[in-house]
Image (spheres, rainbow, N blue to C red):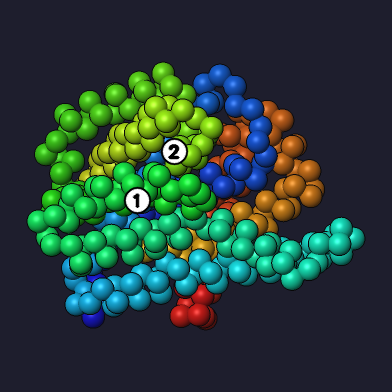
Amino acid sequence: MQKKRIAEWDYVKGFLIIMVILGHTTAAFGDYEKPGLLIYFSSYTVSFIMPFFLLTTGYFLNPSSYERLSDFVKAKSRRLLYPALVWGGTAGCLQISINVAKMIRAGSYSAEALLYRVISYTSSLWYLFASWLCAVILGCIVKKVPEKYAALALSLCAVALHLIPTDQWYVAFAFSFILTGYFLRMAKFELGWFDRHSIVCCITIVLYLALLFWYKYDFSVYVAGCNLFTNNPMGVQIKINGFRWFMGILGSVSTGYILHLVWKFMEAGKSKFLNVIGACVVKLGEMSLEMYCTQFLIVECVFLKIMNRSGLGKIFSQNPYICYFVWRHLIGLLMIAAVYYVGSFFKRKAGKWLY
């Protein structure tokens, strides 16, 4: 039986996939310097997008609805692991075919070199791999540990994952947010919570913006702190891990509250224009996983390669402000449309094979 979809959750997912594509579009312009106030806009998007995405992933994980653990693992493997392997492998093979002449000249066309290229592109879909692995870990604990000890076991696991020497998929980062989303589900959280706690949400927004302004949360904080075995002292590492989780939660609550207010405004029918936009965003949310996979190929691989080889990335980023506020959104909208229509086509024609 097909699960009943909740339109507002699809609206949230649609907004998040839009932000993901805009972020990857910006990355294709190159690592240009963000002066002045621009760093705060960049900090805002970096600090909440993936934490919020992972929170929603954890919220919809429900191992208890499966009779056996094996059934849950199979379902999540089909939903998360399989498309990661398909799209990552496809991107890797595509890059090999594009760079075949360069690889032959460099002499790096051995089986090991080719396999390494495929694996490196496959691992770029870290969100899917991390979500799958976290789902399996969570499912094992929920199904095998007695219910009264499950929450404690899950919490200890979240701490223990930060001791992993190598965490290329950011599993520790992902598990903390997925677990938070799962706990929210267990606490019977619903989006109407924002209506009942508007004062708390407003205070959260103020605190979130103040911390963003004070600390200038950047991408290095987003990816650093994956484990305790780094060059950072243990105390610093623990602070990084705690800080990025705290900022992710603040950003998710703040953004979720604003999205909820806009949703309520659209539901009231006060703006036909917003209603049309909202309906489009909901459609994107219904295809969030398909769009995430498709954008990896179109935006992160093909578009990025075009920007690098043509030199257009440097041209677009000559003025950082115009690049961020104009080109990022104009070209990003084109990328969103391309990803949606290509993803829809693939889903109709070969959905069971690709997703």
Q: Is residue 226 left or right of residue 29?
A: left
Q: Are marks 2 and 1 in contact (CB under 8 Å)?
A: no
Q: Which mark is residue 175?
A: 1
Cα separation between marks 2 and 1: 16 Å
Q: Position of residue 315 (x, y in %)?
A: 75, 37
Residue at 70% across / 37% down in the picture?
316
Q: Is residue 165 visible?
A: yes
Q: Quadrant of the N terminus?
A: bottom left
Residue at 51% across / 63% down in the picture?
293
Q: Indicate which label's residue lies in the foreground, 2 or 1.
A: 2
304 in relation to 233, above or below: below
Sequence-wise, the earlier of marks 2 and 1 is 1
Q: Is residue 285 left or right of residue 340?
A: left
10 Å crowding of disc 1: few (<14), some (14-19), many (20+): many
Q: Is residue 28 left or right of residue 80?
A: right
10 Å crowding of disc 2: few (<14), some (14-19), many (20+): many
Q: Nearer the viewer, residue 274 or 53?
A: 53
* Label 2 sits on residue: 228
Check disc 1 and report its element: helix, strand or loop. helix
Q: Position of residue 185 (x, y in %)?
A: 19, 54
Check disc 2 and report its element: helix, strand or loop. loop
Q: Is residue 171 left or right of residue 33?
A: left
203 in relation to 23, above or below: above
Residue at 35% across / 58% down in the picture?
134
Q: Position of residue 205 (x, y in %)?
A: 29, 29
Amino acid type, callout 1: Phe
Residue at 13% across / 55% down in the picture?
149
Amino acid type, callout 2: Leu
Q: Is residue 173 visible?
A: no
Q: Quadrant of residue 61?
A: bottom left
Q: Position of residue 181 (x, y in %)?
A: 26, 50
Q: Nearer the viewer, residue 230 or 158?
A: 230
